[in-house]
Image: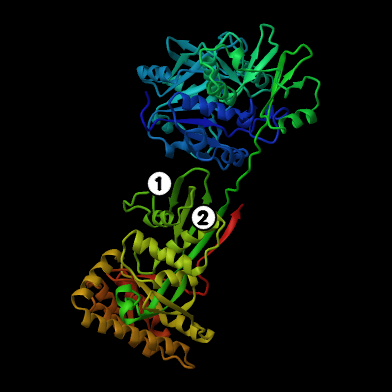
Amino acid sequence: MYSNKMKAVILAGGFGTRLREVVKDVPKPMAPITGKPFLEHQINFLRDQGLEDIILSVHYKSAIIKSHFGEGIRHGVNITYSEEDTPLGTAGAIKLAQKYIDEPFFVLNGDSYADVNLSEFLAFHKSNKGLCSMILTETEDNSQYGNVVMQDDKITSFSEKTPSQNLLVNAGVYLFEPGIFELIPSERKVSLEREIFPELARRGELRGHIHNGYFMDIGRPETYAKFKQDFLKKLSSSQDINVREAMKIVSDNRTDLLLITDKEKKLLGIVNDNILKKYLVEGGEVIDSISKAMVRNPEKVGQIDDDETRIYELLQSGTRHVPILDNEGKIRDIKFREDEIKIENFPTLRGKSPLRISFAGGGTDLPYFFEKYGGAVINTTINQYCYATVKKRADSKIIIESNDADEEVVLDGKNLKYNGEHEIIKSVFNIINPGFGMDFYLHNDVPPGRGLGSSASFAGLITKLIGGLQGIEYDDETIAETAYKAEVEELKIPGGKQDQYAAVFGGFNWIEFGQGDKKIMHPLRIKENTLDELRGHLTLCYTGNEHSSRQQHKKQEKTFQENEIEIAARLQNLKGVATEIKESLLSVRPNFERIGELLHTSWENKRRLSPNISNKRTDNLYEVGIKNGAYGGKLLGSGGGGYILFIHPPKKRNQLVRALEGEEGQLLNFDFETRGTRTWVIDR
C-alpha cells in the first residue's frame, strides 16, 4: 500500500478569519465536530487508510494543537510538528517541513474533508509521473475554490477563486514528489494556489484525479454548519440493523454514540459501547435487532428551547452526549461534553557555557590515577563560550541547527544511535530521558578539538538547558557529573573531570580529586591586580592541528598501565607544579617568571607521558615562543594539537605575537570569566 516512510502533511497553521464568528479562541482546524476537533477527524481518516506518520504544519495558536495531540500516541499515529515562526503560506509551510520528508507525500488542507481512497489516489499518481497530483471534485459554486482546465488527466490551467464555466475544483488533497521542494523558494511566503499550482500546470507537471464522493470545506460558517450536520447523520440509524452492525457504526464513527430513530427521525433510543457490551454479557446475540439492546426513552435529552445552562447541567451529570429534540421528538442536534484541553508550555531557553584553560595538574584528574594517588588541578574559565538556544517540542524529534554544519539534522529522540554526529546531545538526552523532543540552535566562539574543554562545556550547558525545559533546576555538581557521564560512561570517551567542573562552576578553581570519587572545589580568591597582571602575561596560540581527546586518553591510559611507577611519578610532579602555581597566584607578589618556568616543567613532564602528546608542529611553535621571550608554556588539553598557552613578560608580547604569526600560528584574544554555565528563559 504505502512505504514505511510515506508521510502526510496537514496544513493546520491558518488563522481561520472567516470562521471566527462561530469558532472562537481556537485555531480553525480545532473547530469542534461531534465533540472532537475537525483536525482529529482528519487524523482518523489518514490512520484508517494506513498512514500513521503525520506532519502537522502549525502556526496560529499552535500550543492548543500541540497540547491536544502531543506526539499522537492516543490517536494511534506518530505526529511531527513543523512550526512556522511567521506565516509562510501553503507552499512555504510545505517547504519548511522538507527536513522531515524524503519520499512522495500526501498533503491535506486543514479545513477540507474529502473521503478519498488514498491507495487509489497513490496508484493514479504513480501512473501519471507528475510532480503533483490533485484531488478534484465538482461543485456548483466554484468561486470559493481553485478551479482547473483539464486535458485528459492533465491540468492545463489552474486559477484560485476565479469564477468559471468549469465545475471542477481543488478539493484540498494532494500528492507531491520530493522534487516539488526545488520549485518553492525558501524563507518567504509562498502560495500553492497562486504560485506553485499555476506554474506546475504551465510545465505540464500537474495531474487531476476526479473524486465523486463526499467533500466539504469548513472554512466558512455556512459550510462548517453543513459539515456538522452531515457528520451528525452518521450518528443515527433506523432500528432495522442488528447489534453487530450497530457495533461497527459506533466503532467507525469513534464517537461512542448511536441514536436509533424511526422513519420520521424521532428518537427511539440510544446505544453506546458500554450498552452493547452489557447486552452481550447478559446473553444477547450480535444478530439480535438493535431494538432489543438500545436504551429506550433516555432521560438525559435536551429540548430545542433549553438554554445553555440546562444543557451544561445535563453534560455535567455523567453523560458525554445530549441529544437535542424538537417538540415532536425529532433530533435537531447533539451537544457534546468537550474535555478541557490543558494548554502546555513549550518554552524557549538560551544559555552559554565558558571554555577553560588549565594551568597545571591535567592528567591527575583521571580516575585511574586519582583513585590511587589523589589528583589536583588549577584552571580558570575564559570569555570564550559554547552557546545554545533550545525549545521544547510536542513530539519526540530533536532538530539541531549548528554553525558547525551546513544543514539541519533531524533525530528521533526515541531511537538515538551513536554514529559520530552530535554525540554529546544524544548522550545527555539518553541519560536524562526528558520524554519530549526539542529544537537546538548552536554556535561556538571556538571550534571543538582545540584543548579548551569545549565538549565538557557543551555537555554541561545541554544538561542545564534540558533540566530547565523539564522545570528542574539541577545543582552544579549534578550538572558536572551528568556532563562527565555523558562523555565517559555513555560515549566511552576516557577523560578527566576538571573540564566539566571548571565550566559549570566558573572562575579560578583549585580542584582536588580523591578516593571514592571525592571532589573538593576551592574557588580561588585572587586579587584583581594579580588577575590583571596575569592576563597581560598570557598569550594563546592555535597550532593549526585539532586533537581527539578520545584517542589521546586511550593511549595515555595504556602507557600508564604498562609503566605505572614511572608515569605516576611524573603525574605527581604535575600535581606539585599545580600546587606551586596556586600558591604563587595567591601570594602578595606573584612571581610570573617562576610560573612560566613551572609551566615549562609541566609541559616537559607531560610530553614524556606519551609519544603522542606533541608533534613537530607543536614543538616548533613552542620553541619559537621560547626564543621570542616566553618564560614557558604548555599545550592545553590532552595533547596532539590545539592551543599553546604561553606566559611571557608583557613587554615581549609584540615580539612573541609577530614571531608566532610568522609561523602561521593563530592568536586568540581572551579574558578571564568569573561565572560558569548559565541559562535564562526567552519565551515561556
Circle 1 sits on which residue? 407
Number of numbered discs present? 2
Cα separation between marks 1 and 2: 17 Å
Q: Give the structural element (helix, strand or loop) at label 1.
A: loop
Left or right? Give the position of 188 relative to 119.
right
Q: Residue at x 66, y 35 (%)?
A: 26
Report which quarter residue 309 is drawn in: top right
Given the current orientation, which residue lies at the most extreme bottom position? 588
The residue closer to the viewer here, 486 or 456, is 486
Residue 504: percent from left, percent from top: 48, 69
Please tell me which residue lies in front, 169 or 120.
120
Residue 134 appears at what percent x and percent y? 47, 20
Labelled pair 1, 2 in contact (Cβ < 8 Å):
no
Q: Which quarter of the rendering shows the N terminus?
A: top left
Mark 2 secondary-structure assignment = strand
Q: Residues within 10 Å of mark 2 (few under 14, many from 20)?
A: many
As displayed, is residue 573 above or below residue 317? below
Residue 96 horizontal/vertical position (percent): 48, 38
**Viewer-side residue, 9 vs 559:** 559
- What's the image's color scheme? rainbow
Q: Where is residue 439 drawn, in percent x and y?
A: 49, 49
What numbered label is drawn on residue 389?
A: 2
Residue at 42% across, 86% down: 582
Residue 548 seen in the figure: no
